[in-house]
Image: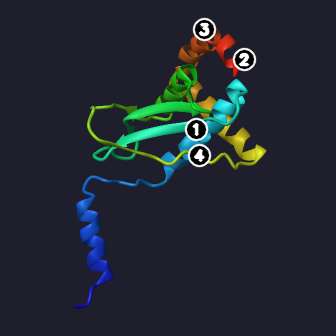
Amino acid sequence: MLCDPEQGFQVTRSRCRGFDPGDGRLEQDICDISMWLVEKYQVPFPHLWIDKHHFQHDYQIACVAVMAWEKHLDHLTTAARHAFLALDYEIRDTGEDVYALQCCEGNHSRHEALRAFSRIEAKRGIRGCSSALSSIDTENEEDFKKI
């Protein structure tokens, strides 16, 4: 029996109902926010873990966590959450099954890092998140210096 590859692809897509890989913006935003955290808080490159529900689309995510060398960094997680909100993401965890998105590998030029920093800072200012993040900056300033 011959198999039509196109037909097989259709079957595979129907099994993954609700899965929407999007336009690649989320992957770029993960990298940009990772680079922004490095520039803003002068920390080693963190792993930004993003979970998404299968039914969520484009600018919807379930969970944000920042990890570095097996440590969960709550203060950086809060900053990363605010950055995603500034980029117009909706963060909502319903408790249902999630899948993890690829972390940024961190192989970026200095130019890319500065572009990412400028982009996130500009969005923070537009969205009014800067006041929320400023309070995080002052509350956790000593924590950031310890890393």
- Asked if the residue under mark 4 is in contact with the one under mark 1, i.e. CB atoms within 8 Å, the reply is yes
- What's the coloring here? rainbow
Tell me the quarter of the picture where residue 137 sits. Answer: top right
Q: Tag 4's secondary structure? A: loop
Whether tag 1 and tag 2 are in contact, CB under 8 A, the answer is no
Q: How many marks?
A: 4
Disc ID at residue 145: 2
Q: Helix, strand or loop at disc 3?
A: helix
- In whole angstroms, how far apart are the C-alphas of marks 4 and 2? 23 Å
Q: Of callouts 3 and 4, which one flags the residue occurring earlier in the amino acid sequence?
A: 4
Q: CA distance from mark 3 to mark 1?
A: 23 Å
Residue 32, horizontal then vertical, whole percent? 61, 41
Q: Which residue is mark 1?
A: 47
Q: Earlier in the sequence, mark 1 or mark 4?
A: 1
Furthest residue in direction front, as rendered: 70
Q: Residue at x 24, y 61 (%)?
A: 15
Among numbered discs 3 and 1, the one appearing first in the sequence: 1
Labelled disc at residue 139: 3
Foreground disc of the pair 3, 1: 1
What type is the residue that disc 2 sits on?
A: Lys
Three-letter code, disc 4 = Cys
Separation of residues labelled 1 and 4 (CA atoms): 7 Å
Q: Of the two numbered discs 1 and 2 on the same chain, state the one appearing first in sequence.
A: 1
Mark 3–mark 4 Cα distance, whole angstroms, equals: 27 Å
**Residue 99 placement, left or right of 116:** left
Q: Which mark is residue 104?
A: 4
**What kind of residue is marked 3?**
Glu
Q: Disc 2 versus disc 3: distance between alpha carbons?
A: 12 Å
Residue at coordinates 56% horizontally, 32% vertically from top-left?
67
Image disc number at residue 98? none
Which amino acid type is marked by label 1?
A: His
Q: CA distance from mark 1 to mark 2?
A: 18 Å
